[in-house]
Image (cartoon, coloured by chain):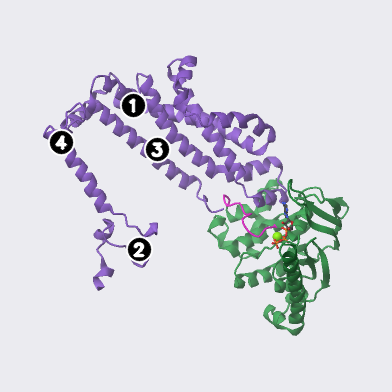
Amino acid sequence: MSDKNHQSSLMIWLGLADNSFTRQKTVKFGDPSAVNSGRAYGIIMVAGLLILWWVSTNFGWIKPIYWPSYSEVGNRLVKLLSEGYRNVSLWDHISASVYRVLSGVFYGAVLGIPLGLAMGLSSIARGMFDPVVEFVRPIPPLALIPLIILWFGIDEFAKIFLLFLASLFIMIIAARSGVNGVNISKVHAAYSLGASKFQVLRTVILPNALPEIFTGLRISMGVCWGTVVAAELVAADRGIGSMIMIAKNFLQTDTVVIGISIIGLIGFGIELIMRVLERWLIPWRGTG
Amino acid sequence: MKTLTVEGVSMTFTIPGMDPIQALKDVSFRLDSGELLSILGPSGCGKTTLLNIVAGFLAPTEGKVVLEDKLVTGPSAERGMVFQQGALFEWLTVEQNVAYGPSMAGKPRRETKEIVDHLLETVGLRDFSSKPVYQLSGGMQQRVALARCLANDPEIILMDEPLGALDALTREKMQGLILKLWKETGKTIILITHSVEEALFLGERLMVMAPRPGRIMKEYGLPFAERGLVEDPREIKAASDFIEKREEILTMIWDMEEEIMGHRSETS
Ligand SMILES: Nc1ncnc2c1ncn2[C@@H]1O[C@H](COP(=O)(O)OP(=O)(O)OP(=O)(O)O)[C@@H](O)[C@H]1O
Ligand SMILES: [Mg+2]
């Protein structure tokens, strides 16, 4: 059985053989860290789905209106990239959506972080805003769309305002729980070292709350990305959500599928970027 | 150089809906400038409460704490703290942690840097000055905590089980460091510990506390800290007079623990 210790790195990469770490373990069932990646099965699964797609569209098992073929998607993608959609380039559709999300999260953070900090630090702020926060928090942002349309119509401001609201409450709660999570020894230490109240806020409370605040930003980004697409489905002339909605009206399933894929990819990309930023900006996370 | 006076301090914690807990009853003592007092006692006898009152984090129900002629009403840079763990600022480097006090006070950069460099040299962390603190071992982190406290040049240093989270070997080394710093700086120190050996070895004076309600049970004057400055610590701890004292105090604390247990089984 000596070959057991010399598994090829390809087999390990494919998740078909134990790596040197999991090989040592005798208890594997129930130990999540001993579960191999199973990458090989992932590859088989994806390849299977792609083949199924090819077969089902090529042999006419499924009508193009329900699911487009490779060639339709390919042609459409080339067209979208070269001509855009409805006189707006694909890039402009994407950046319109991304811009709305970034603006919403930005304004939400600018107002929400100080509010959340204040709610964690002062009984006046906590008393005043707690009822509002608790009431608005469970409302899904999408439920606010009708009201916002009534107030502001359907222009750009209305959309950013909606996203601002979506991120505002997440940021308030994140900043407040960041304050609540402070180890009182750190605060005591700072006062004993002669820090003033304002210095304690700036040099202890705030940095201590940063990991939570960052988690809030990440969740905000995710929620706002979901919300912006939905808001554009309702009313917009540009943006990736509006693109798939209009495409639907013209029964262009290929555009719809491409749009949905782009939404998924960008959502994934945002999450990745936030994770990298977090590791870079808050390396002490989880060490306190 | 200032004298600390603790006068008739009692502390009762009142939590709504629960029986009030008397954590301290009529605790009084005087600590002269430059003295090192260690406090020992079974768990829950109010050591942390007493230290928090001296530090100014808690106001006593009765009595008062006075440093020279100033009534203690809150924390101040005069009374430095060293906590058991978790009180370093992990978003700052070793150097920045040590420089915290002086830079909050607005001391000039160059002066601060000199103080910090000197202290890091003293605690043996020169090479780690620009490392983030969370990359250091527990013992190194406590050395940073000591240096941070000293950088602020307090009148009195309060330590609540500063070595409590360390392994036995590191702990012995750190005891030596505390003695050395005490000698070099001449600071007044109150040190709380669970270890009888540590209390005997480091304390010039030793206060043993009893629980329910927390009070001073017995006070000793001890020769070992002075000797520890010149003699080998292992030899001191193995000497017969050290062992004798250790056993005496251990017996006393065991008796108290037993009393608590007996008391518990009676009431339940
Ligand atoms: N904030 C508080 N509220 C209520 N009771 C408290 C509080 N702090 C301490 N006590 C009680 O006061 C008593 C003394 O607690 P304290 O923490 O001072 O003990 P200690 O001697 O430091 O114990 P240990 O050696 O375990 O650290 C305990 O009975 C504890 O339950
Ligand atoms: Mg304690």
Q: Tell me which label, 4 or 1, sits earlier in the chain.
A: 4
For the residues labelled 1 and 3, the Cα–Cα distance comes to: 15 Å
Residue visible at 27% across and 27% down? A256
Give the x, y percent position of residue A139.
Answer: 50, 29
| As drawn, B247 above or below B33 | below
The residue tagged with tag 1: helix, strand or loop?
helix
The residue tagged with tag 2: helix, strand or loop?
helix
The residue where tag 4 is placed is A56
Dot label at residue A270 = 3
Residue visible at 39% across and 57% down? A32
Determine the chain carrying the residue at label 3: A
Determine the chain carrying the residue at label 1: A
Q: Do discs 1 and 3 belong to a common subunit?
A: yes
Q: Amino acid at mark 3?
A: Ile
Left or right of residue A282, residue A269 in this image: left
Q: Which chain is green?
A: B
Question: Mark 2, residues whose alpha carbon is within 10 Å: few (<14), some, or many (≥20)?
Answer: some
Give the x, y percent position of residue B212.
Answer: 78, 61
Q: Do discs 3 and 2 belong to a common subunit?
A: yes
The residue where tag 2 is placed is A22
- Quadrant of the frame with the N terminus of chain A: bottom left
Which residues lie in the magenta part? Answer: B82-92
Q: Amino acid at mark 1?
A: Ile
| As drawn, B96 above or below A79 | below
Q: Tell me which label, 3 or 4, sits earlier in the chain.
A: 4
For the residues labelled 2 and 1, the Cα–Cα distance comes to: 44 Å
Residue visible at 63% across and 63% down? B121
Mark 2–mark 1 contact, CB under 8 Å?
A: no
Q: Tell me which label, 3 or 2, sits earlier in the chain.
A: 2
